[in-house]
Image: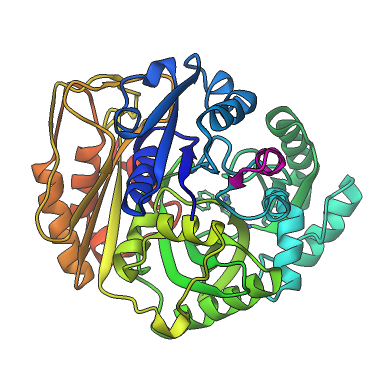
Amino acid sequence: MFEKVLIANRGEIALRIHRACHDMGIRTVAVHSTADADAMHVRLADEAVCIGPPPASESYLNIPAIISAAEITGADAIHPGYGFLSERARFADIVAEHGITFIGPTAEHIRLMGDKIAAKDAAKRLGIPVVPGSDGPISNDEEARRVAKEIGFPVLIKAAAGGGGRGMKVANSAEQLAEALSTARSEAGASFGSDVVYIERYLATPRHIEVQVLGDMYGNVVHLGERECSLQRRHQKVLEESPSPVLTAKEREEIGGVVVKAMTTLKYLGAGTVEFLYENGSFNFIEMNTRIQVEHPVTELVTGIDLVREQIRVAAGEPLGYTQKDIAFKGHAIECRINAENSVTFAPSPGRVTSYHPPGGPGVRVDSALYSGYVVPPYYDSLIAKLIAHGATREECMRRLDRALEEYVIGGIDTTIDLHRSLLKDPDIKKGAYDVHWLERTMAARR
Ligand code: MV4
């Protein structure tokens, strides 16, 4: 096992990784920007190294500074968390070149899944059902017309280097195709430095359902069920739950089996998430994430498996030590992402937290690096806390979440706690009757 892990991240996930390491008897190194000198994980880590000024490009994305910090402190592994360097294949390569273990999948698998066309092609070959579309990049208008005619309108043009929803364009008819293609191409070039695009059939009312997997170095792969992540705003998840309110145990077992078979063939190592659009009872692969995800706690609460601990164990060469039949799904879990934002306008609200009282009691978990007196810096993502509730049933889980939201006090800044309180009261949410467009449609209607 590793003796010392460097945590190449900040905020709640840096603290989450520190806690997993501490529980495993592993010492930790925090790296931080000057803006994060007073961060909770910096205080708790065994050692801390300042790696640069506030902008992420000069600190949390500063590869030479992070590698130097690992060498100076003698860290034998680096955990990248989510965002920042977590899905940079080049970073995983550089870490390995320095004789340090990257806690994550192989650089090769990160690279494969980062290219959305290659990822889809691999998924298809591995037997995962994919959204119907072009088999590769679209070179010209004529090819776009041919593919669109084959799969039928409406179609969606996506960037091969994209993901997360940026640079997508819908074409409802052949007339709209050329313009959608050229707009998507130039946006892709400007945002991702690659104007390679591909086409898919546009699914109008899908749900976002993702399957969590874990693999070790010995060819063992398990799935840990799914997370329903359809409640999103501007491609940012707002609330996630497990299990999905719409899947049957049979559907879970089927899609889980398909994903495990594919990831076993791929020899996937570590934690990963296979994302699907679910519509009319069928799963359509869109992307795979090769990192720990923000919403991993809902899976931890329904399976009892510590995903960050497992990431560290398998990266160190330990076998999973259990098989699919050992994994049982218990109850229901929901996570609310609490952002330092106005609950109505979503305007960012950095600043000093003047009072802090986190909730507790049965079935409540808070993943947050906040404390009273902490100053939320303006430079980074506005996620400041994740409130996760667990219950025997979805109803019990929602009642506990409601109680916890009511108890939660974060003074001095605006937060999205009130947004979550109103979501939990909504009849559609109570029924689980929502798709990926529900939140934005509902908010637009209420303004
Ligand atoms: C789609 C789609 C409809 N049809 N693909 C947006 C984020 C990116 N990961 C995939 N996205 C979508 N891909 C096809 N073929 C609709 C979306 C989409 C969406 C997906 C998941 C969660 C929220 C979303 C919000 C708008 C659009």
In-image side of 291 versus 379 (left or right): right
Q: Position of residue 209 (x, y in %)?
A: 47, 63
Q: Is most of the magenta stretch helix, strand or loop?
A: helix
Quarter-wise, where is residue 247 in the image? bottom left
Q: Position of residue 205 (x, y in %)?
A: 50, 60
The residues colored magenta run: 89-101
Question: Who's the residue at 74% across and 65% down the image?
Answer: 122
Question: Who's the residue at 57% across and 52% down the image?
Answer: 104
Closer to the camera, 440 or 354? 354
Quarter-wise, where is residue 282 in the image? bottom right
Q: Position of residue 308 (x, y in %)?
A: 42, 54
Closer to the camera, 41 or 272? 41
Quarter-wise, where is residue 244 in the image? bottom left
Can residue 311 be seen here? The reply is yes
**Quadrant where the C terminus lies?**
top left
In-image side of 146 versus 55 (left or right): right
In-image side of 81 versus 377 (left or right): right
Question: Who's the residue at 52% across and 38% down the image?
Answer: 75
